[in-house]
Image (cartoon, rainbow, N blue to C red):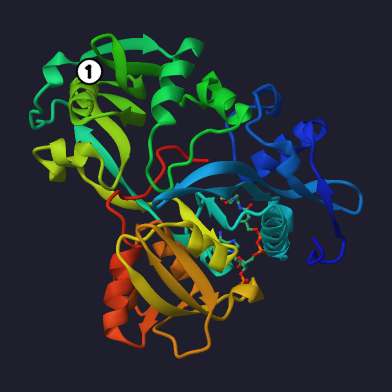
Amino acid sequence: MTDLPAGYRPVDLDPSRHADVIALDVWAFPATVDDDVLAALPSPLTWERARGVETDDGELVAMHASYPFTQYPVPGARVPVAGLTWVGVHPAHRRRGLLRAMIHDHVRRSLARGEAVSSLFAAEPAIYGRFGYGMAAHDVRLTVPRGAALRSVPGADAVRVRLERLQEHHDDVVRALHGAVDRPGWATRETPELRAAYLDDPSAFRDGAEALRIAVAERDGRAVGYALFRRKSSWEPAGPRGTVRVRDVVTEDAAAARALWGVLLDLDLMATTEAWVLEDDPLLHLLVDLRAAEPRLADNVWVRLLDVPAALAARRYAAEVDVVLEVRDDLVPANARRWRLEGGPDGAVVTPADGSPDLVLDVRELGAAYLGGSSLASLATAGLVAAERPEALARAATAFGWPVRPGCSWVF
Ligand SMILES: CC(=O)SCCNC(=O)CCNC(=O)[C@H](O)C(C)(C)COP(=O)(O)OP(=O)(O)OC[C@H]1O[C@@H](n2cnc3c(N)ncnc32)[C@H](O)[C@@H]1OP(=O)(O)O
């Protein structure tokens, strides 16, 4: 991290620094539990990818890490992606450029590992655009009233839903179904540390709700879907007004989705079910009255193309396209030039170009469009993509789209 301000030095982190990492983490993200409780939990970090910043007297005051997603789905392909995570700066050292230095470090090290793309979930959406990350997927937050009517789906009655406490043996169900999902942006928990942290359910993080439960949808004795959820009771003068909090609903087909949501939306003593789902989740179509669920759009994964030609060549395109893109990139100068993209459903070739550009855009907008979640045409309506030739914009927007909306059902 050569760009650190004076008085700070970079440091590789390893498990011996776990207590320091927790002490920093609770400064960056206020917690209601004591450090020793947090330090006793399994760490989801891949330590060899965790980097810190120390003061001259050895205090850890900033850190970042990344998850090694080797099979991150992008349209029509899977690519290695650096999942930036655990970014934190001690409040006494903020706004001195430590995050900026850490992002430079992250970009350099990811590129050296051959990772052409980085992805993240943002704590605050205003932070990462300046570093070339674009909002690449959205999700929809819902508060569904109990007993909300759902459309019927043939075959749903043949799906049996088992309700159980989440236990270790459920790892098989979760892995089989979760790993099978092929949706751009849907990172699977590839590392043992992430999987262990997923099934761990510390009471410290339940926020007054019960232990994690799992609803497993089965057809003919085979798991065809699951949902993780917990209930939080609330006894009010007018009666019970509990809340069901739903995480990760993964289903193989519409009948499984209908059967699971039928159960999750009608649990006794509950008044509402809170869920966040991806933009084309079956629930949005199953609900007869979507408006009653108060849908709110939010940002999901953000994507940064670290190596523009490699990243653009790694995905597939929904239609044939031949376009010259003039890319601006303040952080990675090698990306900042004109690139000719010739691509289609079978692959793509990206070469340096000298001719006049069809589209001019920042690498941030390329990241936003990369998974097919934001249309280049709609970015152009906001003035974020300049089209030198309108017909090229329409063709490129179609090609960058994808039939399955991107997004990840869990925050990393
Ligand atoms: C992927 C993840 O892990 S998301 C988690 C991010 N972490 C958090 O939100 C925890 C709480 N916050 C923090 O730890 C810190 O405030 C951070 C990491 C957000 C910022 O760290 P800092 O060292 O203060 O950032 P730094 O000084 O390098 O600022 C770089 C630029 O980002 C801007 N910036 C920093 N934080 C924010 C923010 N929260 N919102 C908007 N802009 C921000 C700065 O103003 C600066 O802008 P400039 O380049 O125009 O001057």
Give the image quarter of residue 191. top right
Most extreme residue toward the front, as rendered?
346
Instruction: Using the image, determine if residue 211 lies above or below residue 316.
Output: above
In this view of the protein, which residue sits in the foreground, 45 or 183? 183
Instruction: Using the image, determine if residue 364 lies above or below residue 237.
Output: below
Determine if residue 285 is in view: yes
Q: Quadrant of the N terminus?
A: bottom right
Q: Indicate if the residue with disc 1 has its beta carbon within 8 Å of ligand 1.
A: no
Q: Position of residue 271 (x, y in %)?
A: 21, 26
Q: Position of residue 164 (x, y in %)?
A: 36, 10
Instruction: Using the image, determine if residue 89 lies above or below residue 271.
Output: below
Residue at 64% from the left image edge and 49% from the top image edge = 87
Q: Position of residue 56 (x, y in %)?
A: 91, 54
Inspect the image, locate mark 1, and give the three-letter code of the amino acid beneath it. Answer: Leu
Residue designated by label 1: 267
In this view of the protein, which residue sits in the foreground, 93 or 361? 361
Determine if residue 208 is in view: no
Tell me: 65 left or right of 398: right
Instruction: Using the image, determine if residue 100 lies above or below residue 16.
Output: below
Give the image quarter of residue 365. bottom left
Residue at 10% from the left image edge and 40% from the top image edge = 289
Specify few, some or many for label 1: CA neighbours under 10 Å numbering under 14, 14-19, or 20 or more. some
Tell me: 11 left or right of 214: right
In this view of the protein, which residue sits in the foreground, 85 or 81? 81
Tell me: 64 left or right of 14: left
Most extreme residue toward the bottom, as rendered?
356
SS at mark 1 in the image: loop
Q: Position of residue 219 (x, y in %)?
A: 23, 14
Tell me: 236 left or right of 204: left
Q: Quadrant of ligand 1?
A: bottom right
Residue at 25% from the left image edge and 45% from the top image edge = 280
